[in-house]
């Protein structure tokens, strides 16, 4: 595994001679942030050794390297999911590569279903914690060069970045919550009983990503920040049939607010 990570990182460095400070993973319908990046290099996943290919609509499958808010960033325009048939090793492989490229922080975005009755479609939620119900990506032989066998997860998300994001939201009158994200395998959306279960175990939103990437990043001691767009509701009395296309549409409408928050966070020291 170490050899694969190093091979991929070496390819990207040789191809771009670029040293990113911040890694960004953009989820469903949220790839527009790359338009704000002064792109110096754009690599298709299919051209990168050992990289999986994104198969989900709304995930374009490109690695963008360039400047955002004066910082060198590497952004994944499209991520990988367990439900696509990839192993957890494959799903989280790009995070390890970004670490080897030199990133010092990881920012993650996603679309999720709100189970907190105070949430509305189009709201944003900054992740304060998560419950991971997807197989843990650290199962298997530990790679000591990446991190310890039993990494601490008492602070999965960086409190300074959380506080700063909430300050940005307040200053701009954005409707943003802090809450707990529950990660499930998917790909089907949840039943009413599952939504109720997710709320009972402490969740505010539910989605099919993010927690595995954050677990791997924290294993490598990378500070993390994550934010969700609430694209549908799993609240009793508000549950309705929803399609992936509708989820994408809501995410795209909310995207300017999310983009603004991430741009200011990238500039934050």
Image (cartoon, rainbow, N blue to C red):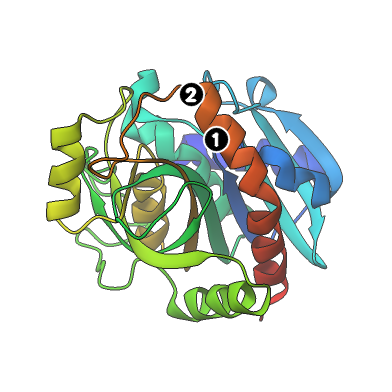
Q: Is residue 169 left or right of residue 238?
A: right
Q: Nearer the viewer, residue 141 or 264?
A: 264
Residue 37 visible in the displayed image: no
Q: Nearer the viewer, residue 173 or 266?
A: 173
Q: Measure the C-alpha gap from mark 1 to mark 2.
A: 9 Å
Q: Residues within 10 Å of mark 2 (few under 14, many from 20)?
A: some
The residue to which callout 1 is attached is 28
What number is the disc on residue 193?
Answer: none
Up-down: is 47 above or below 90?
above
Q: Nearer the viewer, residue 60 or 96?
A: 60
Residue 204 visible in the displayed image: yes
Residue at 48% over, 74% down: 162
Going from N to C along the chain, the mark reached first, 1 or 2, is: 1
Residue 26: image x %, image y %? Answer: 59, 43
Q: Is residue 175 left or right of residue 76?
A: left
Q: Residues within 10 Å of mark 1 (few under 14, many from 20)?
A: many
Residue 158: image x %, image y %? Answer: 44, 73
What number is the disc on residue 244?
Answer: 2
Up-down: is 184 above or below 246?
below
Q: Nearer the viewer, residue 109 or 61?
A: 109
Q: Are marks 1 and 2 in contact (CB under 8 Å)?
A: yes
Up-down: is 60 above or below 20?
above
Residue at 55% over, 21% down: 53
Residue 230: image x %, image y %? Answer: 46, 47
Quadrant that contains the N terminus: top left
Location of residue 92 (image quadrant): top left
Q: Nearer the viewer, mark 1 or mark 2?
A: 2
């Amino acid at each position: 595994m170490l050899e694969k990570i190093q091979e991929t990182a070496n390819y990207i460095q040789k191809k771009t001679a670029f040293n990113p400070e911040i890694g960004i993973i953009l989820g469903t319908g949220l790839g527009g942030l790359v338009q704000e990046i002064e792109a110096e290099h754009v690599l298709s996943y299919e051209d990168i050794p050992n990289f999986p290919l994104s198969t989900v609509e709304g995930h374009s499958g490109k690695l963008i390297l360039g400047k955002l808010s004066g910082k060198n960033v590497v952004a994944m325009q499209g991520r990988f999911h367990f439900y696509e048939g990839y192993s957890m090793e494959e799903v989280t492989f790009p995070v390890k590569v970004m670490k080897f490229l030199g990133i010092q922080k990881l920012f993650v975005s996603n679309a999720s279903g709100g189970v907190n009755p105070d949430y509305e479609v189009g709201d944003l939620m900054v992740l304060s914690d998560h419950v991971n119900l997807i197989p843990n990506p650290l199962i298997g032989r530990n790679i000591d060069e990446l991190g310890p066998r039993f990494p601490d997860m008492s602070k999965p998300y960086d409190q300074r970045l959380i506080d700063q994001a909430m300050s940005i939201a307040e200053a701009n009158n954005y409707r943003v919550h802090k809450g707990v994200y529950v990660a499930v395998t998917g790909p089907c959306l949840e039943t009413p009983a599952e939504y109720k279960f997710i709320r009972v175990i402490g969740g505010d939103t539910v989605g099919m990503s993010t927690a595995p990437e954050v677990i791997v990043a924290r294993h490598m001691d990378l500070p993390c920040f994550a934010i969700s767009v609430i694209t549908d509701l799993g609240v009793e009395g508000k549950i309705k049939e929803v399609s992936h296309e509708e989820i994408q549409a809501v995410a795209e409408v909310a995207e300017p607010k999310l983009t603004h928050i991430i741009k200011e966070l990238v500039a934050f020291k």
